Amino acid sequence: MSFLHLPALALAAAILDATIGYPATLARAIGSPATWMANWLALVEGATERKGGARVLAIYLAPIVIAAAAISVVLPSGPLGFAVAALLASTLCGRQTLDARARALAVTWENDGAFEALEVAEALGPSETEVRLARASAAAIAARFADEVVAPTLFILIGGLTGAAFCRGLSVVGRACRDRRDTSAFGGAVTRLEAWTLAPAARVAAGWIAAAARLTGRGDVFAAALGPAPTPTGPAEAAMLAAIGDPARDDPAYVRLAIGMFRRAAALEFVALAALALAFAVLG
């Protein structure tokens, strides 16, 4: 696919992701790309016992990248091939699923209480460093926005469907290593690769959140977005918490604030993608 088509592909994938998403019935029946990648990761780790560092990481990522590249090659040229590529790329993004999980958390908390909301929050993966459920949930929304929305979009702009597959595969293994605090050579290889890939994307996500906060008059959040980051998604988490302030107490309304900020940041990303796609169409 021509480089001139990549912005249009990223925009089309974003539209499909936000409107259609990955059907829940299909996910229950056959799983999702993220599930398949997690299962493949478990097989690789079981076979290698995570010994080998970068070599094991390459064994995990190579089939994902090769499969996506092969699909890109065999797709027909023209509108049909573009539509299929956009549809496949959209399954590697997570706008609608993130919105649904965040809303499910807020609704459960509002209707059933904080204890029941804890189980729903696990789907978002709240940070264990945050004691309060509200802050942890808001940070988790920002983290997911960074590695499931902004990062795949940027990698589509760079490498099309192949780039999106690489990004999604890396985000799956990176989250797994952080959840279990992996300090092995394998975990170190993942961290080093994230530092050059997902971490810069998280800075972009933090920028979208800061811009959304500025538009709503919530002050200057860019300082938080540019601050030190203990994790790859740290800048986005810091920007979110700075944008919506510190809750007086654990309250589902705080999660609603985070959802609203995520939606505004995602809308700004849409506008930027549309402008970029239009500019490339005119120049092309």
Image: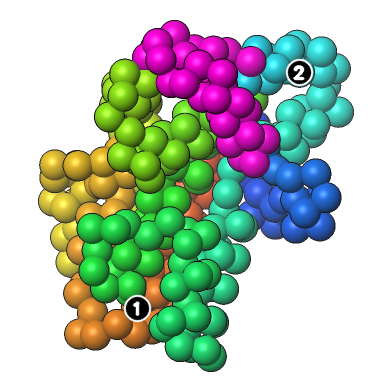
Q: Earlier in the sequence, mark 1 or mark 2?
A: 2
Identify which residue, 226 or 58, lies in the foreground: 58
**Which disc is residue 254 wearing?**
1
Residue at left offset 40%, top offset 11%: 52
**Which disc is residue 71 wearing?**
2
The image quarter containing residue 247 is bottom left
Q: Position of residue 92 (x, y in %)?
A: 62, 38
Identify which residue, 135 or 87, lies in the foreground: 135
Q: What stretch of residues is rendered in magenta?
A: 34-63
The image quarter containing residue 90 is top right
Identify which residue, 226 or 40, lies in the foreground: 40
In magenta segment, residue 60: yes
Residue at left offset 47%, top offset 55%: 266
Dots 1, 2 in contact, CB < 8 A:
no
Q: Is residue 110 left or right of residue 254?
A: right
In magenta segment, residue 195: no
Q: Is residue 148 left or right of residue 72?
A: left
Dot 1 crowding, Cα within 10 Å, few <14, some 14–19, many 20+: many
Q: Is residue 160 above or below residue 126?
A: above
- The answer to whether residue 56 is visible is yes
Dot 2 crowding, Cα within 10 Å, few <14, some 14–19, many 20+: some
Tell me the kind of residue under disc 1: Tyr
Q: Is residue 155 above or below residue 150?
A: above
SS category of the residue bearing label 2: helix
Q: Position of residue 175 (x, y in %)?
A: 42, 40
Q: Position of residue 204 (x, y in %)?
A: 34, 40
